[in-house]
Amino acid sequence: MLKIILPTIMLLPTTLLSPQKFLWTNTTTHSLLIATLSLQWLLPTYYPYKNLTQWTGIDQISSPLLVLSCWLLPLMIMASQNHLQHEPLTRKRIFITTLIMIQPFIILAFSTTELMLFYISFEATLIPTLILITRWGNQPERLSAGIYLLFYTLISSLPLLVTILHLHTQTGTLHLTMLELTHPAFTNSWANLLSGLALLMAFMVKAPLYGLHLWLPKAHVEAPIAGSMLLAALLLKLGGYGIMRVTLLLGPLSSPLHYPFLTLALWGALMTSSICLRQTDLKSLIAYSSVSHMGLVIASSMIQTHWAFSGAMILMISHGLTSSMLFCLANTNYERTHSRILLLTRGLQPLLPLMATWWLLANLTNMALPPTTNLMAELTIMIALFNWSSFTIILTGIATLLTASYTLFMLLATQRGALPTYITSIQNSTTREHILMTLHIIPMLLLILKPELISGTPL
């Protein structure tokens, strides 16, 4: 653990002391080295926990998410270069420092074996995200977006803190391995029902469940590109990961807790997909699409079977890479046309043909085309849900149909059609952007060759 966390912390003096000429180079190469070093976590073991220290340990559920979070830091730094190039040096340093400060907290949140430390790092990721959105966002509405994010997260996670403390007084320990051995008895009494609800609620808001998702489109639309990638690829996964950890802890869930979450998640996947069909704003469309994908993750991790967990795990990883790539592509459009409205950025294929190829690839992975891990994940989740109740096939089937239609709508709206008259000259796509897209797509194409690395099941 420390051989990743310490270099990540040492990125801070690297950022603050690098000369102006080498600032981006140093931080990107250093974080890429950390990312390659973190790949060793994916090695499968027969033990329940690898690299076990006193507070942290990595098992099959957390190692893919940890590698994903280390992998995305250099990509976020690379994506932010363009919109920061006119800022003074101090502000660039502060921006990169904010990005780097989130990293140890996310690593701690994913790898901790102690619920209290998990809660602290889960909440601590909120502060740098808030700074990113409210300082480097594009519109003045970023303040209201920050307030939405802050209050949704805080109001939902205060009951979580109370319940964790209550659990501690009941069982005398918060260590996950100990709790799995003691099995805190959550019977169907009111107190236990409420405590189970409180444990799940914080993660439901973070994941986000449909109905508690209103902060997400706001935060995504107002955030800078690094903030959007961070939110979509990592902070949403914190919610899904928390649900998987806590449901394993609660034992078989009482059915009054099951049904509302399952119905809301599946219905929400349907609703947000149909909302996507009527979106005018590109970033908002991608944000709503991630709500519908995470709805599938919530639904499958509520039914707690092996298939459901591995499907949720694969979907979280592949969605992290896909939506992050889509946000990068939307940002390249935004930097050239300074508009996120789909009507004003259409017909870009003849101008940027190579970018159109990346758009096609990203949209096909978002649609879950066969040789991608997205398809494997969605099929696994659908089979698990169908096995639980055959009625769910109607909802998931319509949801996939709508997903395909809004993805094709997004592709056609940005790439095809007549060029708007006001676009007279446009910058070429840079090598940096192509490298960025390549680093997103290569893991997705490679992971389908060995999907058991990210399937969350011990080999």
Image: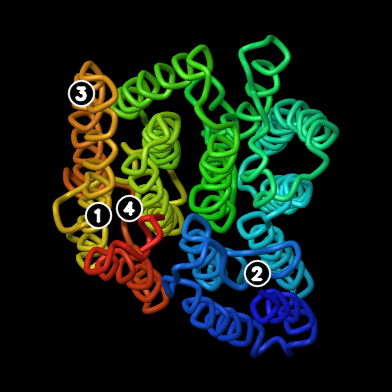
Q: Secondary structure at mark 4?
A: loop
Q: CA distance from mark 4 to mark 2?
A: 56 Å
* Residue 328, image x, y percentages: 42, 58
> What numbered label is drawn on residue 358?
none
Quarter of the image where one finds residue 30: bottom right
Q: Nearer the viewer, mark 4 or mark 2?
A: 2
Residue annotated with mark 4: 423
**Residue at image point 31% right, 62% down:** 452
Labels 1 & 2 near each other (Cβ < 8 A): no
Specify whether residue 14 is in view: yes
Residue annotated with mark 1: 348
Residue annotated with mark 3: 393
Q: Nearer the viewer, residue 87 or 147?
A: 147
Q: Secondary structure at mark 2?
A: loop
Label 4 Cα neighbours within 10 Å, binned few <14 / some 14-19 / many ≥20 = few
Q: Amino acid at mark 3?
A: Ile
Q: Amino acid at mark 2?
A: Leu
Q: CA distance from mark 4 to mark 3?
A: 45 Å
Residue annotated with mark 2: 52
Looking at the image, residue 33 lies above or below residue 124: below
